[in-house]
Amino acid sequence: MNKFSQIKRILIAILVLNWLVAFSKIFYGLITRCASMTADGIHSFGDGASNIIGLIGIWAASKPRDEDHPYGHKKFETIATLGIAVILFLAAFNILRDAFVRMLHPVTPDVTTFSFILILLTLIVNIFVMRYETRKGHELSSDILICDAMHTRSDVFASLAVIGTLVSIKMGISVLDTIVAGLIAILIAKSGFEILKSSSEVLCDGSVLSRARIADIVSKIQGVRSFHNIRTRGRKDDIHVDLHVIIDSNMHVDDAHKLSHKIESMLKSGIPGVTDVSVHMEPYKRR
């Protein structure tokens, strides 16, 4: 099973869990008029919506290279993470708006033992999903899984905050329900900014590898006098490397060509994720 098929199966399984958790929280939150529970449910619903965006992104990213996309379609997975960020921002805005209305028109929620049981069960599910997605995201170098795990991580913290809120409501401090709903919104927005930052690094060709790591490999290759202008870009599973290599001015063009292929081979085998290496040969000039 290839990488994209694995990610697809993971996302579908997590989608089912996320929406089961979301509908449970939203339904119960609306019945009991608990703003923080409803806000947490909306957050969980956003997790499920992000899974759908992830599936669309994976479908586009799995397409092979073609004439119009000679470097492949893998960045479509990264583009899909921007959709997740948008969902988070919209959810944060809606929750803040509802919290503001609650401040003007206070409502005392109904809190029962079932409230605590429900939030604890969904918390356990979220922790499992977060840990599993994080592990698989790093194993498969998947932007979608890693970003979705970040989304679920904020859901875990939000659920912990809701537990604290339920306790405070039980103690008669119902205003904390509205305050915590606002804090959850800020937490959701923060996750959106983190996803936006990591995605922009890939889409704007931010550096992926340290120059020292590439230099350590190239410097050991016979025939290379020196090198400079090392650049890297792309995703962790699709890294493109460009560099200029100084060689003896009397080296035959065939030997220089073989040397460039050797550099490419050494970098691809020495650094996981490197898929393309462009070597610009320059003759050594004596001063």
Image: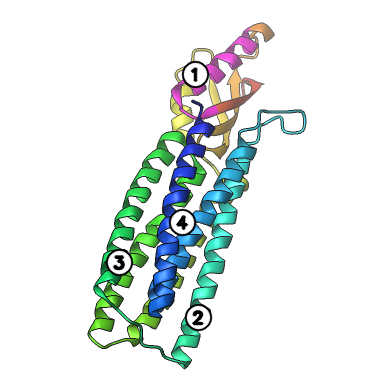
Q: Residues within 10 Å of mark 2 (few under 14, many from 20)?
A: some
In the shown orientation, is residue 117 left or right of residue 91?
A: left
How far apart, in angstroms, are the residues tagged by discs 1 and 2? Answer: 57 Å
Query: Of the residues tagged 3 and 4, which is closer to the observer?
Result: 4
How far apart, in angstroms, are the residues tagged by discs 1 and 3? Answer: 48 Å
Read off the magenta span.
255-274
Query: For this rendering, which residue is in front, 209 or 275?
Result: 275
**Residue name at image x 47 percent, y 49 percent:** 15
Q: Residues within 10 Å of mark 3 (few under 14, many from 20)?
A: some
Q: Amino acid at mark 3?
A: Leu
Q: Does residue 256 show up magenta in the picture?
A: yes
How far apart, in angstroms, are the residues tagged by discs 3 and 4? Answer: 19 Å
Query: Of the residues tagged 2 and 4, which is closer to the observer?
Result: 4
Residue indicated by mark 4: 19
How far apart, in angstroms, are the residues tagged by discs 4 and 1? Answer: 46 Å
Residue indicated by mark 3: 160
Q: Earlier in the sequence, mark 4 or mark 1?
A: 4
Query: For this rendering, which residue is in front, 178 or 239?
Result: 178
- Image coordinates of residue 250 in percent, x first then y, are 65, 9
Query: Of the residues tagged 1 and 2, which is closer to the observer?
Result: 2
Q: Secondary structure at mark 4?
A: helix
Judged from this view, the residue extending furthest toward the right is: 67
- Image coordinates of residue 212 in percent, x first then y, are 45, 34
The answer to whether residue 28 is above or below residue 149 is below
Is residue 187 in view from this perspective?
no
Q: How is the image coloured?
A: rainbow
Q: Earlier in the sequence, mark 1 or mark 2?
A: 2
**Residue name at image x 68 percent, y 9 percent:** 253
Magenta segment main secondary structure:
helix
How far apart, in angstroms, are the residues tagged by discs 2 and 4? Answer: 22 Å
Q: Earlier in the sequence, mark 1 or mark 3?
A: 3
Q: Amino acid at mark 1?
A: Met
